[in-house]
Amino acid sequence: MSSGASLLGGEAVVTAGVYVHVPFCLTRCGYCDFNAYAGLDELKPRYLRALLGEIALSAPAWSDVEVGSVFLGGGTPTTMTPGDLGSLLAELRRAFDIATDAEITTEANPDTVDEASLSGLLAAGYTRLSMGAQSFDPAVLRALERVHTPDSVRQAFEAARSARYANVNLDLIYGADGETLESWERSIAETIALAPEHVSAYALTIEPATALGRAVARGDVRAPDPDVQADMFQLACSMLGDGGYGHYEISNWAKPGYECRHNLGYWRRQPYLGLGAGAHSYRDDRRWWNVRPPEEYLATVERCELPIGGSETLDAADAYLEEIFLRLRILEGVPSSWIDDERAEPYLESGLLTEDDGSLVPTERGMLLLNELVLGLTARE
Ligand code: SF4
């Protein structure tokens, strides 16, 4: 848990994040294993009412925290109207102590926004926009079964700037079937040319229970080649670094001062409350999660019950492992004093780790082998 000095007389104030899950999408992308659904539009009014109900049910237990960030994710939150998303944020502000300078983000799909809707979202208080671009290569977008085109990303980005958005993230995915290093290079170059404040670039992973996972299992589609993805990762590190983006988490780069505070909260193990179907929460080494199917979520909240589907408490050993993993992931590194010299030495010698100002920090190669690094640094005798 993280705390900060109180302005009201010395007591520590806990800073938390609030995540709101919106499960609606225009279509279902073949690679997606998120809790997201196409064709459930008729549930939207009930879903908004249920979110407002869940806010009322959960807020009392969080009255002692200051909310430093709000993040609407999905799914595609912008399949709901700016008016509905504005009502949601107004209710969050009424129920929680949201800091005046809180970072407030909504994810957006390029095909669901225009200048008018983005102006509405900005006026409602969503001051940060995270847009799923994924690629600027039409063939890669088709391989990912994304319905938008590179042009719709460019138009949505320009609409965001016209609406006066000054804090925009573009999400990219690399390693789809047929994507070459040259195509990926063009996607990064186009991204840098648009000059968003933040870029996320994720290696495509194949989840067995998705349409893409089944296509790979049948042999219809090739699985990503880890060596090509490693080259793509290193190309992203080099081009985004040259473009003025600081690499602050394995998959995230930002112009100075634009690091995503909400996601940093997750990685720094600060508490967060998740609202909506399948949303996860964390506080004091306890994790819990809401029921995942939207209908079950709605029915539970409509009975005025918290829609909790399960929970777990981390023991000290698990909490330590998680701390090491997350510190390496956000490139803050692990204090050298936490790790025996003989454990760290092989990784320093092989160039997977480097020592920086008393901390062990993964190199680019080390980031590609993070699980191996964490296991090697923490293995019990
Ligand atoms: S838009 Fe995003 S959340 Fe929706 S189906 Fe596609 S990848 Fe999943």
Image: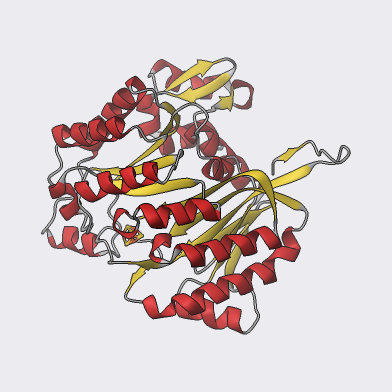
Q: Is residue 291 left or right of residue 23?
A: right
Q: How many marks?
A: 0
Quadrant that contains the C terminus? top right
At 33% from the left edge and 60% from the top edge, which residue is drawn?
112
Q: Nearer the viewer, residue 293 or 80?
A: 80
What color scheme is it? secondary structure
Q: Is residue 292 above or below residue 100?
A: below
Residue 278: tell me if it is visible.
no
Q: Is residue 176 left or right of residue 87?
A: left
Extreme residue toward the right, this view: 9
Quadrant that contains the N terminus? top right
Q: x and y percent of residue 73 in the render?
A: 46, 57
Q: x and y percent of residue 229 in the render?
A: 24, 37
Residue 8: tell me if it is visible.
yes
Where ligand 1 lies, by quadrant?
Answer: bottom left
Q: Nearer the viewer, residue 377 or 204?
A: 204
At 50% from the left edge and 75% from the top edge, which residue is drawn?
47
At 26% from the left edge and 33% from the top edge, which residue is drawn?
188
Q: Nearer the viewer, residue 245 or 89?
A: 89
Q: x and y percent of residue 322 in the render?
A: 56, 43
At 56% from the left edge and 76% from the top edge, which residue is drawn?
49
Q: Is residue 178 above or below residue 229?
A: below
Q: Is residue 225 left or right of residue 132?
A: left
Q: x and y percent of residue 171 in the render?
A: 35, 44
Q: Quadrant of residue 225?
A: top left
